[in-house]
Image (spheres, rainbow, N blue to C red):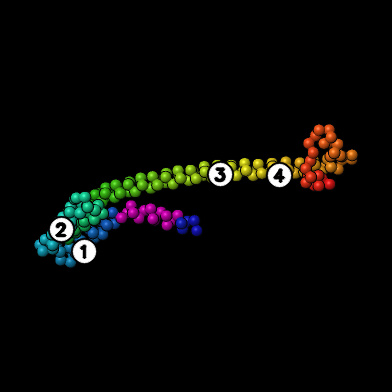
C-alpha cells in the first residue's frame, strides 16, 4: 500500500514538469500529420495559420496592457500564438530541420516561462508552510502555558484538600484524647472552639 502512494506522488510531481515538452511535441506531431495530408507548400493554409497566430498575439498584447490586464489571458494568448506559428511552419515545410529547430526553441521558451511559475509557486508554498509552522508553535506555547496554569491550580486544590484533611484528623485526634476539656483551654486563655466545631468533635 505504501508503494502505491509513493508511485502516485511521483507521477503527480513529474506530470507538471513534463507538460511543456508534451505540449510542444503534440503540436509538432499534429503539424507533421497535417503536412502529410496536403498542408505542404499550401499557401492558403500558411496564410490562415499566420493570420490566426497574429490575431492570438494581438489578443495577448491587448490583454497584457493597462490596469485591467490579465496575466493568465495574456499568457494563454501568447502560447496559442506560438503554437499556431509552430503549426503553420511545421505544416508548410517539406523537411524536418526547421520544424525541429522551432520545436526546440518553443520547448525551451515554454520551460523558461514555466520555471518562473514554478519558482513563484514554490516560494508561496514555503511562505505558507513557515506561517503555518509559526502558528502551530504559537498555539503549542499557549497550550503549554495553559497546561502549567491548570496543573498549578490542581496542585493548589490538592494541597488545600490535604490541609483540610489533616486539620480534621488533628481535631478528631485532639477530641479523642483522655481528659480533653475545652473549658479548661478557654480558662487558660486559649481561643475557644465554636459550637459547630465542638459538635463535630463530639
Q: CA distance from mark 2 to mark 3?
A: 65 Å
Q: Which circle marks residue 161 in the picture?
A: 4
The structure residue drawn at horizontal position 15% and vertical position 58%, both measured from the top left corner, is: 55
Asked whether the viewer can see residue 93, the reply is no
Asked whether the viewer can see residue 34, the reply is yes
Q: CA distance from mark 1 to mark 3?
A: 71 Å
Query: What's drawn in magenta, residue-wise?
Result: 6-19
Residue 106 locus on image (x, y percent): 22, 52
The structure residue drawn at horizontal position 72% and vertical position 41%, both measured from the top left corner, is: 163
Say whether marks 2 and 1 touch (CB < 8 Å): no
Query: What secondary structure is marked by label 1?
Result: helix
Q: Nearer the viewer, mark 4 or mark 1?
A: 4
Q: Which circle marks residue 25 in the picture?
A: none
User: Mark 2 or mark 4, which is nearer the start of the sequence?
Assistant: 2
Q: Which residue is mark 1?
A: 33
Q: CA distance from mark 3 to mark 4?
A: 22 Å
Q: Which residue is mark 2?
A: 55
User: Mark 4 or mark 3, which is nearer the start of the sequence?
Assistant: 3
Q: Which residue is mark 3?
A: 146
Mark 3 crowdedness (10 Å alpha carbons): few <14, some 14-19, many ≥20: few
Q: In terms of depth relative to the viewer, which is nearer, 143 or 192?
A: 192
User: Mark 3 or mark 2, which is nearer the start of the sequence?
Assistant: 2
Does the magenta portion include 130?
no
Query: What secondary structure is marked by label 2?
Result: helix
Q: Nearer the viewer, mark 4 or mark 2?
A: 4
Q: Nearer the viewer, mark 2 or mark 3?
A: 3
The structure residue drawn at horizontal position 35% and vertical position 45%, both measured from the top left corner, is: 123
User: Mark 1 or mark 4, which is nearer the start of the sequence?
Assistant: 1
Q: In terms of depth relative to the viewer, which is nearer, 69 or 21?
A: 69
Amino acid at each position: 500500500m505504501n508503494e502505491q502512494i509513493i508511485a502516485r506522488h511521483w507521477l503527480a510531481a513529474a506530470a507538471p514538469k513534463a507538460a511543456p515538452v508534451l505540449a510542444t511535441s503534440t503540436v509538432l506531431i499534429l503539424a507533421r500529420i497535417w503536412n502529410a495530408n496536403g498542408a505542404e507548400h499550401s499557401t492558403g493554409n500558411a496564410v490562415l495559420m499566420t493570420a490566426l497566430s497574429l490575431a492570438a498575439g494581438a489578443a495577448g498584447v491587448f490583454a497584457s496592457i493597462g490596469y485591467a490586464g490579465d496575466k493568465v489571458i495574456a499568457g494563454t494568448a501568447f502560447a496559442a500564438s506560438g503554437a499556431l506559428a509552430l503549426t503553420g511552419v511545421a505544416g508548410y515545410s517539406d523537411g524536418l530541420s526547421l520544424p525541429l529547430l522551432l520545436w526546440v526553441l518553443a520547448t525551451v521558451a515554454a520551460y523558461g516561462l514555466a520555471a518562473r511559475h514554478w519558482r513563484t509557486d514554490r516560494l508561496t508554498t514555503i511562505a505558507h508552510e513557515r506561517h503555518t509552522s509559526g502558528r502551530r508553535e504559537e498555539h503549542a506555547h499557549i497550550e503549554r502555558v495553559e497546561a502549567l496554569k491548570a496543573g498549578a491550580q490542581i496542585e493548589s486544590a490538592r494541597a488545600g484538600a490535604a490541609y483540610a484533611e489533616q486539620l480534621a484528623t488533628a481535631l478528631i485526634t485532639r477530641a479523642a484524647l483522655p481528659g480533653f476539656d475545652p473549658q479548661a483551654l478557654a480558662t487558660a486563655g486559649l481561643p475557644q472552639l465554636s459550637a459547630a466545631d465542638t459538635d463535630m468533635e463530639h
